Amino acid sequence: MTLLNETHDARLRSWVASANAAGCDFPLQNLPFAVFRRRGASEAFRGGVAIGDQILDLAAVAASGVLQGPAAAAAQAGAQDKLNALMALGQGAWSALRLALSRALREGSALQAPLQACLVPQPQAEYDVPARIGDYTDFYTSVHHATNIGKQFRPDNPLLPNYKWVPIGYHGRASSIVVSGQSFHRPQGQTLPPGAQAPVVGPCKRLDIELELGIFVGEGNALGQPVPIAQAEQHVFGICLLNDWSARDIQGWEYQPLGPFLSKNFATTVSPWVVTLEALAPYRVAFTRPEGDPAPLPYLDSDANRERGAFDIQLQVGLRTPAMAAAGQADATLCRTSYRHAYWTVAQMLTHHTINGCNLQPGDLLGSGTLSGPTLDQAGALIELTSGGKNPVQLPGGEQRVFLEDGDTVVLRGWCEKPGAARVGFGECWGTVLPAL
């Protein structure tokens, strides 16, 4: 489990001036990873590191030869068109690269001149999905989300008996995971209209969002070899924002007995920037359970997980309608919550995923599930915010939404901040709904 070191010093400043600005998502203490290239260029995608409003091009850094040892090897691995090779190197390599870049990008660094030539302005960049995602698993880690949804179907018993004992998850579709900024067409599928005796096929009418975090697996484990909870975070490369778009009407008809299918596999959007667990170290908090809830089974429990296994990541969902865009208005906030409210931690998710011997691989993605907080204004999905469509969300200019309409743009934001620590941000994760084909 990563603890604080010199890279977290809130007093550190960078020779990249924009990294020192108040409210910056990407100060020197963050240094998240993405895959990018110059917009409109024919050049290859490659790994980069955010610093202020710039991207440090890892391919250019590797070619410059300014780094040495494990940091140089890590930069070379990160220079590829996906981050899988860097992810596979393990925690020691990621930490070595982070330390080397932190020192190289600090004010007064002797490497300022050669690295200045390795910077690309973020507005000039376009991004790709950070890794080749072999497998995608979506969890269900918010007890508040599970309770809110359960109340709509089982008012007297919203939580199923297994929820407080086992991290619930299901296998999703990796091929339809896209990077922030891409639009997608409203999905079609079977639904059962109210009062109907037979289903119909057509566009989804209850299109929803799911505010989630994505957890990228780093170093994998061998088939048949479970990862104990004490080692679980060594296998986690970092965290991104994730919107698992959901077709609620399709889901309601298809999900029994095997769970979601077409209602989930049409699009999942991830943010381009992956924030490492090391960068998030100042924002660790205790993992706690409500009084009277069962303690996790021994394989899901450890002193370290109880003391600092959760993260206080602030999360926000914004919605911008076509009318708002035409008027030049910014998105309106739908909800704000924190990852600290999750019922299961990153380490518990990964440990449970492998307890049966399942082999995770570098670049695999775990979704946290919808991250709703304890009050309804912290709900991370429209189906909760509107109480199943009964109470429309009020928007600027008199508009309302029950579920998403064509042309709507949804943006997720995430950040960590507190006195005495540098702000660590995740950037944005956004997508726009297009009409059904």
Image (cartoon, grey):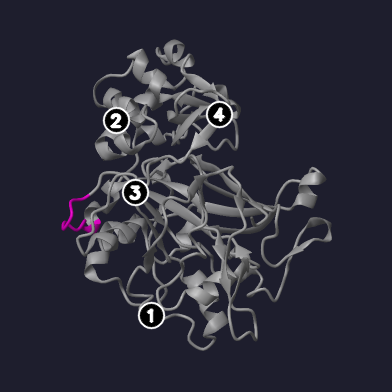
Q: Is residue 380 magenta?
A: no
* Marked residue nearer the N-terminal end (1 or 4): 4
Name the side, left or right, on which 218 lies relative to 409: left
Q: Is residue 138 above or below residue 49?
A: below
Q: Is residue 388 above or below residue 434?
A: below
Asked if the residue at tag 2 contacts the one at tag 1, i.e. Cβ–Cβ closer than 8 Å, the answer is: no
Q: Nearer the viewer, residue 170 or 91?
A: 170
Name the side, left or right, on which 323 lies relative to 191: right
Identified by mark 3, the residue type is Gly
Name the side, left or right, on which 132 lies relative to 125: left
Identified by mark 4, the residue type is Ala
* Marked residue nearer the N-terminal end (3 or 2): 2
The span picked out in magenta is: 221-229
What SS does tag 4 mark?
strand
Within 10 Å of the Cα at label 1, are there few (<14), some (14-19), or many (20+) other Cα atoms? few
Within 10 Å of the Cα at label 4, are there few (<14), some (14-19), or many (20+) other Cα atoms? some
Q: Which mark is residue 292?
A: 1
Identified by mark 2, the residue type is Ala
The residue beneath circle 3 is: 134
* Marked residue nearer the N-terminal end (1 or 2): 2
Residue drawn at x 26%, y 65% is 301
